[in-house]
Structures are given as structure tokens and as C-alpha cells.
Image: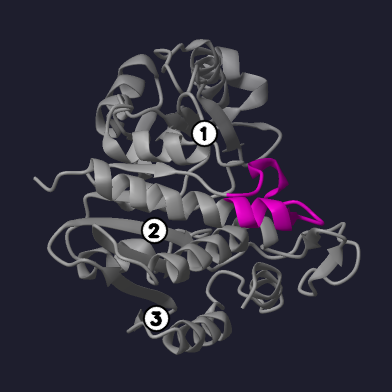
Amino acid sequence: MNPAELITLLVGTPSVSGEEGPLADLLQDLIATQGFKVHRQGHNLWFAFGKPGGSRLLLNSHLDTVPPCEGWEGVPFTPIWHEARLQGLGANDAKGCVAAILLAAFELAAGPLDGEVVVALTAEEETGGNGLATILDQLGPLHGAVVGEPTGLRVCAAQRGLLVLKCTARGQSGHVAHAQMLGADNAIHKAARDIGRIAAMDFPLHPLLGSQKAQVTQVQGGLRRNQVPDSCEFFIDLRTGPDQDHEALAAEFQRQLESEVVIHSKRYLPKGTDPDHPIVRAALQAAGKAGPVGSGTTSDWAFLGDIPGVKVGPGDTFRSHRPNEYVTLPELEAGARFYTELATTFFKMQVVP
């Protein structure tokens, strides 16, 4: 199957998060016909090939897409070719990466390898559900990982994590007309002071990820227009760096704010890989890039623990989650060549501990 046929097949099979079954069925059969033993759990697929006992490299991307948004020209689930550009839901994020990884795997398996490749095509990346994290313990030891996301083949050696804090300002209720005489404590005013403090906070600059600011994303408080509110709830979204600990950050917010602070979500951990690690050097060599970059978006890399990894793939992150997303045939072909060269280069560089 050539690259155009494969990506058309992938994009033409709807796979919104949680509904990846038909695409997983299709790919399970397709991969098996290529002679691989395919493992499956839920809508997650994986297979391995190459030289056992040596270095093991994970090539991963996700099968699921977000639901279609407004503004699409035509039917989002119908792939449409505009010369060498394929438009359709998931074409860019991340079925182009899935196709490129499969094309690379089929080519790599045809020749001798100095290590073992593990390909994992996983579910629910967009929702953080039953995906890569649920099968990682079944993949065996891994010495490097490549997470396929649309980066324009720029090699991301650092990725921001996500810390969400729920803050509650407490006050004392009373009639608005008597607030000053009663000394009623307005919880919204207290929250507003804290929100001002949050906006003024600075965090250390990361060499690949740059600066960051905490963002207050939701605020809710007050019961009646004539009643001083006794509580106000707001949420903080902070995109964290590899040198930041989520628990320590939450404690620091609590020290600086009047409101009560609790961790709402901390599971998307920030990631970073030493630029001198073989996985980074192999990716840079395969991509023809001078140095790595950072990524502000999360991905399944967050769940890979201490496995050294990079995030890289064909396509453009700014096309993701937008109407009329697309991937081009040259991007797809370049992605397949990239993953092929990365794997062979990594195995030549890597020494199993």
C-alpha cells in the first residue's frame, strides 16, 4: 500500500476519542497481513520486530481525533485530495504520523536491524483515557521512545506538563446594604486579590520552552446580586517545565494566596531529555536539524516515565483541532523516511545499559 492509499484509508475511517474501534479493527488486519503478530487491548494496538536482546525503541502515535468543530468545508470524515494535500479530520493530528510510522515499520522489518522496534498505536490521547499509559507495562523494557505528533519534523526534546489547581476563597455573607457595618468579608474580593497575585507571578525561564505564566481560566462565586458572597471558586492552569515539581508548585501557590489551594489535576507530567542522549542525537541527524526545540502542548509522552524520548512527526501543530486540517503527501513521505533513519541511527548509537 502506497502512502496516499494508506493515509486516505486512515482519514476515511472515523475515530473520535473512545470510538476508535473500527480503525483499530482495520489496522489490526492490515498489520497482520504484513506478517506481524499484533497485540491488542481495547482500542490499543502494538507489535514488535527486529533483533531481540538489544536496544528497544518505541514508535508511538495515537489513533483518535477530537470531534469535528464548526467551519469545515464538506464532510470532516470524508478525505478530500487537493492535488498533493489530503484534507480530513485527523489528517494532521495525528493520522499522518500513524501512517508514516507504519510505512517506516514495513520498510525497517524488511532488512536487518541492530535492535528491536516496538510500534504502539494507541487510543484516547485527546482525552487522556485508556491509551498508552494502560499498556506501557506490556511493551517490555524500552531504551528510547518517539512520540508521533505533528511538529514539522522539528525534534522536541522538552514538553510542558499540565497542573490544574482549584482555589476557593472563603468569606462571610451578609446583606450588601449592611456590608460595611457588619464587616462582611467578600469572597470575590479576596479571590480578585489572589488573581492579581497570580497574574504577577514569574517562573524560571526554560532553555527550550521559554517563559510561562499561570492562567486563571474559570471563576464562579456569589448567590444573589444583593448578598455578599461567602465563597468564590477559581481554577489555575499552569503549563509546567521539566524542572518543576507539581506538588512543590501547589505548595508555593498556597503560601502566596489567601484562598485554599488543592490540586485538581497533575497527571500530565512535564518531560525533558538530555540533548546529548542518543534518542535526541539520532532524531536530529535523521531530521537534518541543528538542535532540539520545546513543545508547549501535552501528549502521551507525559506517561512514559523515565524513558528517554522525543516528540516529532510530519504535519504542523497549528493545523490541529481546526477546520479543514490537512497533511501533504511530501510531508508524509518525509515522515516515513525520518522514522526509518531515526531507528537505524539510534540502534547504531545506543548501548544497552
Counting residues from the N terminus, which is met first, the one under dot 2 or under dot 3?
Answer: 3
| Residue type at the position of mark 1 | Gly
Q: Secondary structure at mark 2?
A: strand
Q: Residue at x 56, y 69 (%)?
A: 17
The region drawn magenta spans 314-334
> Few, some or many C-alpha atoms within 10 Å of disc 3 (few <14, some 14-19, many ≥20)?
some
Q: How is the image coloured?
A: one colour
Q: Which residue is mark 3?
A: 42
- Of badges 3 and 1, the one in the foreground is 1
Quarter of the rendering containing residue 46:
bottom left
Camera-near label (2 vs 3) is 2
Residue 154 left/right relative to 28: right
Q: Is residue 233 visible?
A: no
Instruction: Pick whichever of labels 3 and 1 is earlier in the sequence.
Output: 3
Q: Are marks 3 and 1 in contact (CB under 8 Å)?
A: no
Is residue 155 found left or right of 276 in the rendered image? Answer: right
Question: Residue 175, how many percent across, how many down?
Answer: 61, 29
Instruction: Identify the amino acid type marked 2.
Output: Leu
Q: Amino acid at mark 3?
A: Gly
Which label is found at residue 59? 2
User: Residue 307, image x and y in percent?
Assistant: 24, 46
**Residue 345, position as x, y percentages in the image:** 34, 45
Q: Residue reaching furthest right?
A: 73
> Is 319 within the magenta?
yes
For this orientation, the residue located farthest to the front is 111
Q: Is residue 19 above or below residue 63?
A: below
Residue, disc 1: 288
